[in-house]
């Protein structure tokens, strides 16, 4: 039993149009740290998805007619409830996902930030009046909700990735049907219950746990009432959704894979760079889309940086997310461990040096030692593929042009990081990096206040900031002859 002050937040039935839905089949949700069974949840079917979309379509009409201020009040209450229950939500999150409890609490506050931000934005969906092209014409641009939205969300941020889709969608006047990751449905069900307690009308937010990800995705794409899909996950699945959505020209927001470079110049504050690198590489045990994947260090400071980084990485406490002091929890699955192991052995076989870590952790299960490799080159798999685990590969470089070419030599373009003491170099590199986001002298860029998203094969659309609500709005141009 999880130590919850509100045990009823641990739901196992799907949340379909405001009501618990037991369904015919169930699947097990387990704690990745211990393998313990947490719940047997409803395994929703494409028919359930169709039902949720139908209910959302009905509910959305009234919701869109409400004032932004009325929608804002409900979202604000939802935010307040999330904050009030942050400890319970963090406990559920750590139990199903494995990240350290303090990090889980950070995620809950991060997610709540999106709800608060978009509660405020609901009141600011301004249209425009334009000068007419003829003297009797008055031109107006309205911003109207897209309609019913489908969200497909990942296991690495079981709370925040839902909050940052649902909050702008609801603020804009849309309804949303969420298919959370099968590994982590419990956080999303708890969020939905709190939204209902905040006064969100039934049907506007359904949560459908399912192991039938592909069929639910197909229903989202094929159902003409579903006007938009917002997906966070792999580039491969993003590509499938694009293909499937093509028949109906489905609107898509895609937050996909990354291959983030982390560049350290010889004029950087090395201690700050190591600290930033730990944050950006080892947050969530390396399991975020914005995690550093390639570390480029300029020749003159390379050895000093590697020594400092290796010492800091070797000292990271690995353990159960509920154990005090844990910095690195278990990985989500045995397959995730295999990927890290493959990247380590590919790199060392091709000449990289293992500086620290490199193997399964003595704790067993899906724990892996935080690892640093040096002497990494462009021929190794880690240069091209996202590891999604606690592996820090270090490359050596000489010049700005060389490192920009190497950093941009990837199909991805989500996050990037640079450490330098020079303002002009900051600008040069910031402008030269082909990425949707750049952190300069910081390893943590995520905030609800800014537009999060990528270019190239890292996706399309933005989440967060005033830009994040645009993905849930259509423009309607009206021409009045007066
Ligand atoms: C992600 O990994 O997809 C999200 C990371 C973040 O919001 O910081």
Image (cartoon, rainbow, N blue to C red):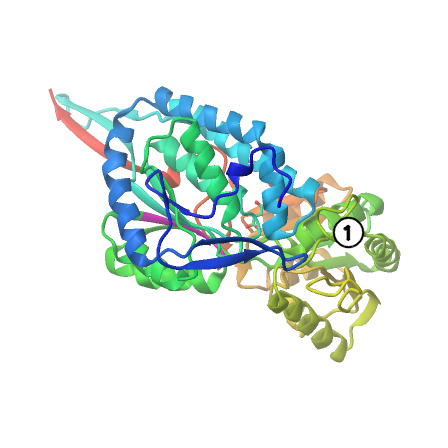
Q: Left or right? Give the position of 356 relative to 86.
A: right
Camera sees residue 42:
yes
Which residues lie in the magenta part? Answer: 228-233
Vertical placement of 205 versus 78: above or below? below
In the image, what residue occupies the spot 71% across and 59% down? 390
Q: Left or right? Give the position of 133 relative to 70.
A: left
Residue 102 placed where, x, y %? 70, 40
Q: Name the residue that disc number 1 marks.
A: 265
Determine the residue located farthest toward the front in the rendered image.
1
Residue 37 placed where, x, y %? 58, 56
Residue 114 placed where, x, y %? 51, 34
* Disc 1 secondary structure class: loop
Q: Left or right? Give the position of 66 relative to 321.
A: left
Q: Nearer the viewer, residue 479 or 221?
A: 221
> Which image quadrant for residue 129?
top left
Principal SS element in the magenta part?
strand
> Which image quadrant for residue 200?
top left
Camera sees residue 452:
no
Q: Nearer the viewer, residue 254 or 141?
A: 254
Vertical placement of 342 versus 150: above or below? below
Q: Does the magenta stretch include residue 36?
A: no
> Which image quadrant for residue 72?
top left
In the image, what residue occupies the spot 59% across and 45% down? 93
Residue 353 placed where, x, y %? 82, 71
Vertical placement of 338 versus 109: above or below? below
Mark 1 and ligand 1: say if the CB distance to the nearest ligand atom is below 8 Å. Answer: no
Of the 4 image quadrants, the one containing the C terminus is top left
In the image, what residue occupies the spot 57% across and 27% down? 84
Q: Residues within 10 Å of mark 1 (few under 14, many from 20)?
A: many
């Amino acid at each position: 039993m999880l130590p919850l002050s509100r045990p009823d937040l641990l739901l196992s039935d799907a949340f379909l149009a405001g009501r618990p839905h037991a369904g015919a089949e169930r699947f097990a949700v387990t704690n990745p740290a211990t393998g313990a069974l947490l719940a047997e949840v409803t395994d929703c079917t494409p028919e359930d998805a169709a039902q949720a979309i139908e209910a959302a379509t009905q509910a959305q009409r009234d919701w869109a007619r409400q004032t932004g201020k009325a929608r804002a009040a409900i979202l604000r209450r939802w935010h307040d409830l999330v904050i009030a229950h942050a400890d319970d939500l963090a406990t559920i999150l750590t139990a199903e996902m494995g990240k350290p409890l303090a990090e889980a609490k950070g995620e809950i506050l991060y997610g709540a930030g999106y709800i608060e931000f978009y509660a405020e934005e609901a009141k600011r969906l301004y249209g425009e009046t334009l000068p007419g092209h003829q003297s009797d014409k008055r031109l107006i641009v309205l911003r109207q909700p897209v309609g019913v939205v489908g969200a497909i969300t990942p296991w690495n941020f079981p709370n925040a990735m839902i909050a940052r889709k649902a909050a702008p969608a609801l603020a804009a006047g849309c309804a949303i049907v969420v298919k959370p990751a099968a590994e982590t449905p419990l956080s999303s069900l708890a969020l939905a219950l709190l939204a209902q307690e905040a006064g969100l009308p039934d049907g506007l937010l359904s949560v459908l746990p399912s192991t039938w990800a592909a069929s639910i995705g197909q229903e989202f794409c094929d159902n003409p009432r579903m006007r938009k899909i917002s997906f966070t996950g792999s580039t491969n699945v993003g590509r499938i959704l694009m293909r499937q959505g093509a028949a109906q020209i489905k609107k898509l927001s895609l937050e996909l894979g990354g291959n983030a470079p982390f560049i350290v110049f010889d004029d950087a504050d090395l201690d700050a760079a190591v600290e930033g690198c730990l944050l950006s590489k080892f947050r969530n045990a390396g399991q975020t889309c914005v995690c550093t994947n390639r570390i480029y260090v300029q020749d003159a400071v390379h050895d000093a940086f590697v020594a400092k980084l290796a010492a800091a990485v070797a000292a990271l406490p690995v353990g159960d997310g509920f154990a005090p002091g844990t910095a690195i929890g278990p990985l989500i699955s045995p397959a995730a461990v295999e990927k890290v192991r493959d990247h380590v052995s590919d790199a060392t076989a091709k000449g990289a040096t293992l500086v620290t870590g490199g193997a399964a952790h003595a704790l067993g299960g899906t724990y892996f030692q935080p690892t640093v490799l040096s002497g990494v080159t462009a021929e190794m798999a880690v240069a091209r593929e996202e590891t999604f685990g606690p592996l820090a590969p270090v490359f050596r470089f000489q010049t700005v042009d060389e490192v920009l070419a190497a950093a941009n030599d990837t199909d991805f373009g989500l996050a990037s990081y640079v450490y330098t003491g020079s303002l002009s170099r900051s600008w040069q590199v910031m402008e030269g990096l082909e990425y949707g986001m750049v952190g300069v002298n910081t390893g943590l860029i995520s905030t609800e206040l800014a537009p999060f998203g990528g270019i190239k094969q890292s996706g399309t659309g933005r989440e967060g900031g005033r830009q994040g609500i645009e993905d849930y709005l259509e423009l309607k141009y009206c021409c009045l002859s007066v």
